[in-house]
Image: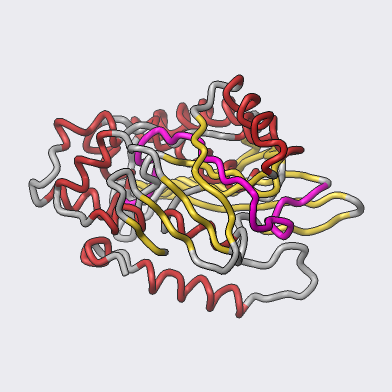
Amino acid sequence: MSKEYAKAGVNLDKLRQYHEYIAKALDSRNLPVKIGHYAGVVKIGDKYIAMHVDGVGTKTLLALRTGKVEVTGIDCIAMNVNDLVCIGAKPLAVVDYLALEGEMDDVVQKVVKGLKMGAEEAGVEIIGGETAIMPGVIKGYDLSCSAIGLTETLKTGEDVVPGDVVLGLASNGVHANGYSLIRRLIDEGKLRLEEWGDELLKPTRIYVRSALEVMDYVKALAHITGGSFSKLRRITKFGISLKMPEPPEVFKAIEAAGISHEEMYRVFNMGVGMVIFTNKDVKEEVIEKLRKMGETVYELGVVTEGNGIKIQTYKNSIIHI
């Protein structure tokens, strides 16, 4: 239970219950990938079409306060294309949905600019979308996307076994998760937006090109977003043992504002935005290719016998997720 996040209005345990209920209610035995993984998949001929939908969340409210609205357009693309590559798909196209509290010319212009920047970085086309004005329903603006990708080979983690290596790619900071909690800390005066605004409004990193570069060498990938490292349960039922690097200073500031060390690792990415599972025999080749792509790569740990996720934090605390 992430207590402070729940106080801010986001109960991760309840959210998981909703996910489980929806997945069960919509269950289809004909799907190549079970509902609840990083993307939904249908098979057409010898190819798999992958789809995903996600939004920016309450980071939009801080974007309005700081004027850094373009960032959320990049976030929106990133949250979708990063999940598509986690099942082995190459992202191809995106449609966006922008809902506004009222007439907001500046927001529309900045959001579109950010969407175009993100799409270019991810190598996808924005092929359409929808815009709505909904006073009384929307506060500020809400932004989401749906994305589609294609692959001939799925990467779902089914072949991950004990002894496999777990690598991590550096994040760009908080990315686009945990902002209801962050905003509560700001509103209570425990975290100063004037001091940390630039860090908090950095865009989510887009890992598409790097992930595709090593796709033939990896068994699975995990985008670390809401719920943090609990997302690794989507990959394997075996155990996972991780030793985390020291995180960027912004995470230390959030913790110092009143969040327990353990909860930080249950809510935030703590400096690791993408996790890669690979065979130990090709580990060095994967690391070399990723570093050539400009990635900061961490050797986080290994897959183990048993089950559960054990995290050794940068303070040498042990957390079980």
Q: Name the image quarter holding the C terminus.
A: bottom left
Say if the magenta span includes residue 159.
yes
Residue nearest the viewer, comparing 220 with 129 = 220
- Is 1 in front, or is 126? 1
- Out of 139 and 178, give the one closest to the viewer: 178
Q: Is residue 147 left or right of residue 20?
A: right
| Occupied quadrant, residue 280 | top right
Residue at the image point whose x is 40% and y is 33% from the top: 172
Q: Position of residue 308 (x, y in %)?
A: 50, 66
Decide: is 192 above or below 302: above
158 shown above or below 76: below
Q: Residue at x 54, y 44 (%)?
A: 275
On the picture, is 308 further left or further right than 315? right
Q: Is residue 210 left or right of residue 109?
A: right
| Magenta span | 153-178
Find residue 2 and report its horizontal and vertical position in percent. 29, 65
Q: Quadrant of residue 35?
A: bottom right
**The N terminus - image quarter:** bottom left
Q: In the image as oriented, which residue stretches furthest toward the right?
A: 45
